[in-house]
Amino acid sequence: MPDQIDEMTPLACEGSTQALTTTPVVGSPGTALAPTLAPGGEQVGPGEIRVTILGSGDPFVRPSQASASVLVEVGNAAKDLFFFDLGSGALKNFTGLRLPVTATTKVFLSHLHADHVGDMPTLLYSMAKAGRRDPVEVWGPAGATEALGTQAYTATLLDAHAWDYSSLRGHPGQSGAAAVATEVPFDRTEVVYQHDGVTITSFPVIHMQDGAVGYRLDYAGRSVVFSGDTRPCRFLVEAADGADLLIHETFPSPSVYAVKAGVPPAFAEAVVNGVHTSPVMAGKVFAAAGARMSVMWHLAVDHQTVGSAYREMRTAHDGPVTIAQDLTVFNVTADAIVTRQAIPDPFPWPVLGPTGITGPPMAPIPEPPAWWADAMFTG
Ligand SMILES: [Zn+2]
Ligand SMILES: [Zn+2]
C-alpha cells in the first residue's frame, strides 16, 4: 500500500482543509456532506454521532494544537454534547464551532494530568459568564487515595477559584459556576451514565498510576471509544469490540520523540513505551479492535512526526486510519463514517441555547469596597 500520509502532506494549521485520513468516507452516506464543516451549519441527525477533536496535541500546548479534548454530540432529543477531557485551548476550538455554551454541562475526564483538564476553570467560570446557567457534571476516576480522585480535584478546583465565584454575586452566571463530581472506578469496566438514549461505560487503562480510565459511548447502535492516555491495554481492546470509531492515544516512536523533545533515547523510550503507546503498538491495537475508523490522537502533528507515525502504524494495521488534528470531525452513522475538518469562526461570540437555572441561587450584589469612591478616575 502506498504511503498516503507523509512528510509532505499539508496540515490543517497551515491552511489545509483536508483531514489527515486514509479514508475520508467509510461506507456510503445517505446524504452528501459539504467538504468541510461550517460553524453552526449542520445539525446532528437522529441516530447520528458527531465527534470533533477539540484538542489533538500533547502536554506542550502549541499554536497548531490544543491539549487533549474530544467533543461528542449525539442526535437525541436533548441534543446532548459531552466533553471527553478538556485540555488547554480546547474551549477556544469549541467556541469557534458556534455550539451552544448553555449545553456545556457534561465532562468525562480520563485522568487528572494537567493537559487533560487545563480548560476546566474556563468551563466552570468563563462559560458561566458567557451564558451557561446550569452546573457542570464531572465524571472521572477515583484515585488510589481520596486526595487523588476526581471528587477531591473538583472540590479543590472550586476552592481555588473562590475569588471568581465571589465576584459572581448578583450575576446570572452564578448558577452555572458550580460543579458536581461523580467518581468512576479505575480498576474495572462499569456503565457510568445512562440517559436519553446514551450509555457511557468506563474501563481501566494503564497510565502512570491508579486513576486513569477510557470511555465508550453508545447511542442508537453507534459507538465511540476514547482511550485517554494509556499503554496498550486489553481492557480497551475488549471495550472497543464492535465500535465504530476508536480514538487512541499515540506518541511518536522513541527515536523520533528523542530528536523532537531533545531528550536522551532511554528517557524517550520510558516516556513513549512506559507511559504511552507507540505508532506500531497503536497499529496492533487498531488491528485487534477492528473499529470502522481508527484515530491516532494526542500526537504532536508536524512534518517530522506524521509520516513516520503513519508508516510505523501501517506495519500492523491496514484499515481506515486518521491522524487527529484540531477540529478533525467524524460524522458517524449506520451508513458511513465521514471524516473532515471543521473551519472555525475566528470571531465567535457565545451562542445560547435552552438552559435551566439549576445551580445555586443568585446572591445579592455586594456593596462596592468603600475605598473605590476615592480611587475612581472620572475623567
Ligand atoms: Zn496523561
Ligand atoms: Zn496526556
Image (spheres, grey):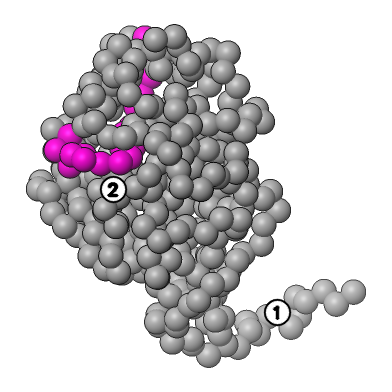
Q: Is residue 139 left or right of residue 344?
A: left
The residue wearing badge 1 is 372
Which range is magenta?
237-255
Q: Relative to 327, is 264 above or below? A: above
The residue located at (49%, 42%) in the rendering is: 329
Q: Relative to 354, is 11 above or below? A: above
In percent of width and height, residue 339 lies at 47, 37
Question: Tag 2's secondary structure?
Answer: strand
**Foreground pick, 293 / 70:** 293
Q: Is residue 81 left or right of residue 240?
A: right
The residue located at (49%, 87%) in the rendering is: 363
Residue 204 seen anywhere in this rendered image of the structure = yes
The residue wearing badge 2 is 223
State the quadrant of the C terminus: bottom right
Instruction: Looking at this view, name the residue that lies furthest to the left.
Output: 188
In percent of width and height, residue 98 lies at 60, 58
